[in-house]
Amino acid sequence: MCRRSPPPLGGLACATPDAAGNVYFSLAYQNTIMKLDVTTGMLSVVAGNGSGSVSGDGPADLALDGSGCMVFDSKGNLYFGGRNRIHKLANGVVTTIAGTGEAGFGGDNGLRRARS
């Protein structure tokens, strides 16, 4: 049986398992987050389109720029950092929950998204 080879995992920034034991890889150089399904052995892109720019919130195939560390919450939502922002991936949609993309401290008592 011939299987297509997965893309190289260049720029591995972080790897973390979900509750089912699947492993998610944050690939900084490829601007994607990939999932290794432990049941099938298949590697798939779950966020990012390979572009090195940030296109804002929206579908998971939007442009990411240098995704970093990741963590899952108890509901299975994936949180990840990248370029002075924290994002949430839930139900195929990426939402910025903190940061503006600019480095620095925006102060206390402001909106999360307005803080750097």
Image (spheres, rainbow, N blue to C red):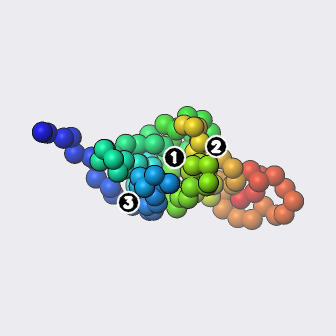
The residue that label 3 is drawn on is 11
Read off the residue under disc 1: 64
Mark found first going from the N terminus, 1 or 3: 3
CA gap between label 2 and label 1 equals 12 Å
Q: Earlier in the sequence, mark 3 or mark 2?
A: 3
Asked whether residue 31 appears in the rendered view, the answer is no
Tell me: residue 63, above or below residue 69: above
Amino acid under disc 3: Gly
Task: Please name the residue shown 84% across and 56% down the image.
Answer: 110
Upstream in sequence: badge 2 or badge 1: 1
Q: Which of the labelled discs sits on residue 95, or is there none?
A: 2
Query: Residue at point 49% right, 54% down?
Result: 18
Residue shown at the point (87%, 59%) measured from the top left: 109
Q: Amino acid at mark 1?
A: Leu
What SS does tag 2 mark?
strand
Residue 2's place in the image compared with 98, above or below, is above
Q: Is residue 28 left or right of residue 91?
A: left
